[in-house]
Amino acid sequence: MDLFTKLRPEKQSIREGVTLLTSFADTDILLAEIPVLLGASPLRRMLTPGGRQMQVAMSNCGPLGWVSEPTGYRYTAYDPLSGNPWPDIPLSFRTLAREAAEQAGFSGFEPDACLINEYTPGIRLSPHIDQDEADRNWPIVSVSIGIPAVFQLYGLTRGGRAENIPLYDGDVIVFGGPARLIYHGVKKVERARDARIGEKRINLTFRRAH
């Protein structure tokens, strides 16, 4: 796997509006920030509006955080578990998101929300679209940390065959423009181990919510 990851192109255009930046993120720097963020707003498995518990454990940092409530999905300035504001997005996170977006052709991206998602072996993320943001002219920037996963790209409508994109530690995928509202998900995560965080994959998803 190490040889394979070293041989991959640094930048790949997957389709119009979707760019993969391989080994773009220094994940040691990111991991140093995460314990403080999760100490302020711990991971939790939210309930969908239909009452089902999500598989992926998550939290947020930034001026806004994405939450699920009985009335639906929305962004809020306060962590519903504590009533406190979400922790600030660290400078290293902001810099990474801005530089990744610029590499993909989206200059000027400044996220106001960062979702922190934790996957363990056996967890998957069903196909969905990110549509709770007020301004969809800005892209989604997604960063992989830890064990590998397979990102699944579909089209602008639900269903069909997925395009499978293996993601490894440090990979960043950016999608926006004509691909901003594509359906996407994560295939069931296979068992593996990262020397720093064990059998986990952490995903940072940067968005411009408002």
Image (cartoon, rainbow, N blue to C red):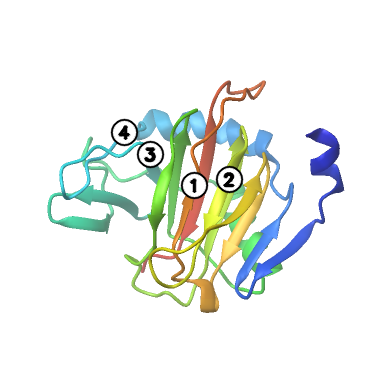
- Pointer 3: what residue? 58
- Check residue 121 in the rendering and tell me which mark sits there, or answer none: none
Residue toward you, 190 or 108: 190
| Dot in front, 2 or 3 | 2
Identify the residue shown where x is 32% and y is 65%.
132
Q: Are marks 4 and 3 in contact (CB under 8 Å)?
A: yes
Question: Total of numbered circles in the picture?
Answer: 4
Q: Are marks 1 and 3 in contact (CB under 8 Å)?
A: no
Q: Which class describes the residues within 10 Å of circle 2: few (<14), some (14-19), or many (20+)?
A: some
- Check residue 150 in the rendering and tell me which mark sits there, or answer none: 2
Seen in the picture, residue 200 relative to 152 is either above or below; the reply is above
Label 1 SS: strand
| Dot in front, 4 or 2 | 2
Q: How many angstroms separate mark 2 from mark 3 (CA)?
A: 19 Å
Q: How many angstroms separate mark 4 from mark 3 (CA)?
A: 5 Å
Q: Amino acid at mark 4?
A: Arg
- Pointer 4: what residue? 44
- Pointer 1: what residue? 186
